[in-house]
Image (cartoon, rainbow, N blue to C red):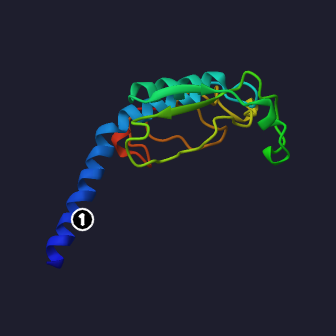
Amino acid sequence: MLASSAREAVESWEAVDEAINEGAETAFAFLERLVAAPSTVGHETAAQQVVAAELDRLGFEVTELGIAEEVAAHPRAGVAQAAYKGRPNIRGRINPGRSPSLLLNGHVDVVPADKQTWTSDPRCPGARRVGAPRRQPGGPHPRHPQRAGRA
């Protein structure tokens, strides 16, 4: 019985690995679009639009949610680095109320890059920091061997 359970577990993980590999190029393309979008504090709209478009592509119902003044002014809301006006949150919902819930919460704002330390625009695929080692063109990416040949 234990061997059967172990075999089923291995087969389940193999299915997960296969699904990850099948979706890898699409996921990397999304991440490249997201990284390429300007997203410093107060200028997150382009990155939020990339996220909204991807959620929509995946079949989510996408909604922009503004930050209400009473929420922004609440003492426990923290100190905003920029006004919330014109900086909505993006919500993606799929099967609302009809399935178990999972909430993923993140942010898209980044610290501005010091352009003097980069060989090109740091938001472009293939950008690297000055002095960073270069991988062999056409060689595998150290973390993602399936991306061989892509800079």
Q: Is residue 71 left or right of residue 15?
A: right
Q: Position of residue 71 (x, y in %)?
A: 77, 37
Q: Is 89 in front, or is 14? A: 89
Let me know if residue 149 appears in the view.
Answer: no
Residue count near mark 1 (Cα–Cα under 10 Å), binned few <14, some 14–19, many ≥20? few
Residue furthest to the front: 97
Q: Is residue 122 left or right of residue 139?
A: right
Kind of residue sitting beneath label 1? Ala
Residue sitting at 82 percent across and 31 percent down? 82
Q: Is 76 in front, or is 104? A: 76
Residue sitting at 67 percent across and 37 percent down? 130
Q: Is residue 88 left or right of residue 145?
A: right
Residue sitting at 15 percent across and 75 percent down? 3
Let me know if residue 56 appears in the view.
Answer: yes
Tell me the SS state at disc 1: helix
Q: In the figure, 147 relative to 4: above or below?
A: above
Residue sitting at 47 percent across and 34 percent down? 93
Q: Is residue 110 left or right of residue 74?
A: left
Question: Which quarter of the rendering shows the N terminus?
Answer: bottom left
Q: Position of residue 85 (x, y in %)?
A: 77, 23
Q: Position of residue 121 (x, y in %)?
A: 64, 26
Q: Is 18 in front, or is 3? A: 3
According to the image, label 1 marks what residue?
9
Q: Position of residue 27 (x, y in %)?
A: 41, 35
